[in-house]
């Protein structure tokens, strides 16, 4: 252009005008769709001619074949392309036929959406939450939510893959360029006219025979009628008794007779009732009495118990806690099956809440009452260890199916209870004494040590302040562990109870094995409390010596621990 910088020359002026006129005819911008004419074809590429471009754009033949443009690969044919770059690093023009097709396709989708017209597409693949649908005409990709695939749940959609079919455009995001379609809406539109004709056949009061349970919701249960209509039975219309969820009463696939209670021709809905197929049993609930045995039919089994019918429409709850006297967390599935007739006792009738509660275990003999009659408190019985934990044993009494509780503290008088507990295992035979029976709470407590001789019986003829002889078993900083002669139980004399003089109250004075005298400072056999004291014995002997030989002042300079010995020597001298 520098050659024609001098415009004073008439030839230069003429060239400038020609150049401006040529550029004004061709408007080429990046990001726009332009048309190119095929002027050359090779094995792999197609070369296009576009007026105004300095070089020929190149397209891959495979790209055109994938787009379904095989027939247009001929010299002279025109193809629409998107001009991506006027010049790349290599100086080439970059164009795309597929992107041009998608942009044109978007315009067609917008037009169909605005006119509310269906489009033809095919499901090409699955994705999270739904499927990808390809617009057949333009190749544009759209999203099909899982809830919009069909008007009923489909476990397998393989028969729908890659099949041309109609879809309704339900949402377009022009900013992001996203489209959402629905197959369900197309199906429903066809069924709507047919459904209106079907609903015309029903009127309030009609009886529908053998409707099949199709599904649940929190507000009711859906039934399929003759594979042509779905009807709703509201939660309040399921039973005269209180129902928290339909699965408490119904099972998928069951068949029930229904009564039509509402028909909405505008919404194309039919409402039905199960409970109105029978009279309200609560109108004559007075015929039933509390604590009386009745027959009940098991209609549904749950994790927490079973639902039973005292009569058609009168559903009651048999909770798992009312199945057995002895078994905890027992499963109704292991005891009953649907259709069984069982004995039950009515434990509650609430007319306001329309609720009836029953118990099966009350019709059975209470083993705790039987145990109380046969083995009253204080009885010695034989049993077997059936279980244990970190602080107790559970003992099964031989001829009665109840578990008795045996705490480790009731195993022995002598040792640590937890140490004694470790000696027992499941299956061990054991003789125990009945200590406590609580029939209402279903608790029985037994003890093993109560069947053995109590070492504290040794103190039965002893009294407070009495002197006894003990043997020192061991010593530590806290005091002396001693055992009275003829007794099997050990006791502790605390450091503060060894001597009156604090200097003599040292456990280290003893090595173990010595025999010493001490006094009983406390004795309560009912509370099983015995306390021994050497200090008390010293105080008693001092008191006796002072009363016999002189005033308190005469012995103030004598050590209390040797006072008794000094007094004995004085007696001998006399």
Image (cartoon, rainbow, N blue to C red):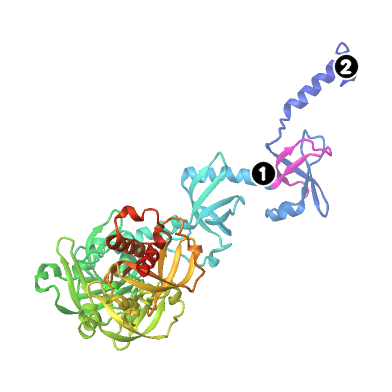
Residue at the spot of label 2: 11
Dot 1 crowding, Cα within 10 Å, few <14, some 14–19, many 20+: many
Q: Position of residue 383 (x, y in %)?
A: 34, 85
Rendered view: 378 above or below 349: below
- Residue reaching furthest to the top: 8
Examine the image and state in which quarter residue 66 appears.
Answer: bottom right
Of mark 1 and mark 2, the one earlier in the sequence is 2
Which marked residue is nearer to the observer: mark 1 or mark 2? Answer: 1
- Residue reaching furthest to the bottom: 399
Q: Residue at x 38, y 80 (%)?
A: 486
Q: Position of residue 77 (x, y in %)?
A: 74, 47
Examine the image and state in which quarter residue 354 appears.
Answer: bottom left
Range covered by the magenta-colored residues: 75-97
Q: Position of residue 382 (x, y in %)?
A: 33, 87
Rendered view: 340 above or below 51: below
Return the residue nearer the eye: 390 or 142.
390
Q: Residue at x 20, y 83 (%)?
A: 373
Return the residue nearer the eye: 275 or 488.
488
**Callout 1: SS:** helix
Task: Please check the rendered image and state whether residue 96 is part of the magenta-colored stretch, yes or no.
Answer: yes
Which label is found at residue 100?
1
């Amino acid at each position: 252009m520098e050659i024609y910088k001098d415009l004073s020359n008439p030839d230069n002026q003429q060239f400038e005008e020609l150049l401006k006129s040529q550029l004004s005819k061709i408007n080429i911008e990046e990001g726009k769709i332009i048309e190119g004419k095929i002027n050359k074809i090779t094995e792999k590429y197609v070369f296009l001619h576009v007026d105004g471009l300095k070089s020929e754009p190149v397209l891959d033949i495979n790209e055109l074949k994938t787009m379904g443009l095989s027939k247009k690969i001929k010299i002279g044919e025109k193809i629409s392309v998107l001009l991506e770059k006027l010049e790349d690093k290599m100086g080439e023009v970059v164009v795309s036929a597929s992107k041009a097709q998608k942009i044109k396709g978007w315009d067609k989708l917008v037009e169909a959406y605005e006119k509310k017209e269906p489009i033809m597409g095919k499901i090409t693949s699955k994705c999270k939450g739904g499927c990808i649908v390809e617009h057949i005409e333009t190749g544009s990709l759209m999203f099909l939510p899982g809830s919009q695939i069909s008007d009923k749940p489909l476990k397998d959609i393989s028969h729908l893959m890659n099949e041309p079919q109609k879809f309704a455009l339900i949402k377009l995001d022009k900013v992001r360029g996203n489209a959402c379609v629905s197959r369900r809406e197309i199906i429903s539109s066809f069924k709507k006219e047919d459904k209106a004709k079907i609903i015309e056949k029903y009127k309030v009061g009609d009886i529908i025979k053998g409707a099949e349970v199709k599904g649940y919701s929190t507000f009711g249960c859906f039934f399929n009628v003759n594979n042509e209509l779905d009807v709703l039975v509201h939660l309040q219309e399921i039973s005269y008794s209180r129902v928290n969820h339909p699965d408490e009463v119904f099972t998928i696939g069951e068949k029930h007779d229904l009564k039509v209670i509402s028909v909405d021709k505008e919404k194309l809905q039919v409402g039905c009732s199960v409970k109105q197929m029978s009279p309200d049993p609560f109108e004559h609930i007075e015929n039933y009495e509390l604590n009386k045995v009745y027959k009940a039919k098991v209609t549904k089994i749950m994790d927490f118990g079973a639902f039973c019918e005292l009569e058609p429409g009168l559903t009651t709850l048999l909770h798992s806690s009312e199945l057995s006297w002895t078994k905890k967390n027992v499963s109704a599935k292991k005891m009953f099956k649907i259709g069984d007739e069982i004995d039950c006792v009515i434990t509650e009738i609430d007319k306001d809440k329309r609720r009836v509660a029953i118990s099966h275990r009350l019709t059975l003999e209470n083993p705790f009452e039987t145990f109380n009659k046969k083995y009253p408190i204080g009885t010695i019985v034989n049993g077997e260890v059936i279980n244990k934990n970190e602080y107790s044993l559970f003992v099964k009494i031989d001829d009665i199916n109840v578990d008795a509780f045996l705490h480790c503290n009731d195993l022995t008088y002598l040792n640590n209870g937890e140490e004694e507990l470790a000696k027992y295992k499941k299956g061990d035979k054991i003789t125990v004494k009945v200590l406590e029976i609580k029939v209402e709470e279903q608790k029985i407590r037994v003890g093993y040590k109560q069947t053995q001789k109590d070492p504290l019986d040794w103190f039965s003829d002893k009294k407070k302040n009495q002197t006894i002889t003990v043997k020192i078993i061991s010593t530590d900083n806290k005091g002396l562990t001693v055992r009275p002669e003829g007794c099997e139980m050990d006791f502790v004399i605390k450091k503060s109870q060894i001597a009156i003089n604090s200097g003599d109250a040292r456990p280290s004075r003893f090595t173990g094995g010595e025999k010493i005298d001490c006094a009983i400072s406390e004795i309560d056999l009912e509370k099983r409390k015995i306390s021994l004291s050497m200090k008390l014995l010293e105080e008693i002997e001092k008191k006796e010596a002072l009363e016999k030989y002189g005033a308190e002042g005469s012995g103030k300079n004598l050590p209390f621990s040797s006072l008794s010995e000094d007094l004995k020597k004085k007696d001998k001298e006399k």
